[in-house]
Amino acid sequence: MTHSLWQQQIEEAISKINFNKTPNDLYDPIRYSLGLIGKRLRPLLVFCGCDLFNGNTQEIVNAAAGIEVFHNFTLLHDDIMDNAPMRRGMPTVHTKWNSNVAILAGDTMFVKAFELVMMVPEKYMKVVLDLFCKTATEVCEGQQLDMDFEKQRTVSIDEYIHMIKLKTSVLLACSLKTGALVAGANADDTEHIYEFGKNVGIAFQIQDDLLDAYGNTEKFGKQVGGDIISNKKTILYLEALQLANGEQRKQLQEIYDGVIKLNDAEKVETVKTIFNALEIHQHVKVLMDKYYNSAVSHLDLTTASTQKKKVSLLFAIS
């Protein structure tokens, strides 16, 4: 019930953002992007972080919308860098328009995100903006590491976890902590809720890697096997290299290096055959559970009520 009310407030706040301007080729892609409604997980976590510590959720509506606009900005640019054709089951902005339009639309969304995040009570503005700026920088660092890894033959699992922490999980952690800060939560609580979000985010990205290889295109909303086609060194690939025998490892590396020439469908099928033989799905699920359990331990250490912690855990597994 609370979840649906928050969702409604988020949609209303996003609908009120004035993107009804010209030139159309700048603002049409923004409206299109924000209209491809996803889970709105990040703004919901802002509400959750605030409610956990008995704050006034009306004070964080605009900041929550700003974090969602920022997230969608990153998706526009990520899709260009990944050459992704689909997002949430629809053509990506750079596919529907072109890359230059998508870059500029994303830049405009970035500016608007700052404007919205600033709209918290003045006494919290500096600490919220400091957190947001730090997070925005880390997200860019994570994306660069992700691209760097495509060119590196060797990436460790620890390096990969660090990359997804920056690229994905710090924004979830920032969302929760933003809400907690505006609620006036103490320093220990804000740090534990940040760690909760960070570890949930890592588990979430590991799950996303699994879905990329094993999900359903209709439900997943993206091209299944896209990470394999793009030679992304996901946790599945890295675990496979550790577990593979000599011949399997050689074949995987030669496929990703382009030594073995395959079309996209053949490449996905061949790599997944190796993954299946090594039971990679099960191994990666164990790692995902490890980070989820770490998240729960941090949530348990907060002073929030048991009932409100249960609501937070529902977000973590949804």
Image (tube, rainbow, N blue to C red):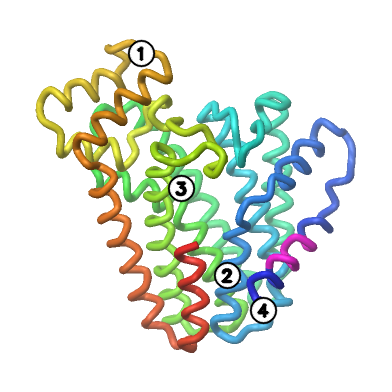
Q: Are marks 2 and 3 in contact (CB under 8 Å)?
A: no
Q: Residue at x 45, y 30 (%)?
A: 226
Mark 2–mark 1 distance (CA, rounded to whole Å): 46 Å
On screen, residue 26 versus residue 33, left or right, reads: right
- Percent from the top left, x then y, of residue 311? 52, 76
Mark 4 or mark 1: which comes first in sequence? Answer: 4
- Left or right: 115 as drawn, with respect to 24: left
Q: Amino acid at mark 2?
A: Thr
Q: Secondary structure at mark 4?
A: helix
Which of the two labelled residues, at mark 3 and mark 4, occupies the earlier sequence position?
Answer: 4
Sequence-earlier tag: 2 or 3: 3
User: Label 3 vs label 4: CA separation?
Assistant: 29 Å
Question: Which of the 4 image quarters holds residue 42?
Answer: bottom right
Q: Is residue 56 above or below residue 315?
A: below
Q: Which mark is residue 167?
A: 3
Tell me the tag on residue 178. Answer: 2
Q: CA distance from mark 2 to mark 4?
A: 13 Å
Which residue carries the number 4 mark?
A: 123
Residue span colored magenta = 7-13
Q: Real-space Cα distance between discs 4 and 1?
A: 58 Å
Disc nearer the start of the sequence (3/1): 3
Query: Residue at horizontal 44%, vertical 88%?
Result: 303
Vertical placement of residue 49 versus 220, above or below: below
Q: Nearer the viewer, residue 105 or 265?
A: 265
**Depth check, front residue: 281 or 68:** 281
Image marks 3 and 4: residues in contact by CB distance under 8 Å: no
Badge nearest the viewer, 2 or 1: 1
Q: Secondary structure at mark 2?
A: helix
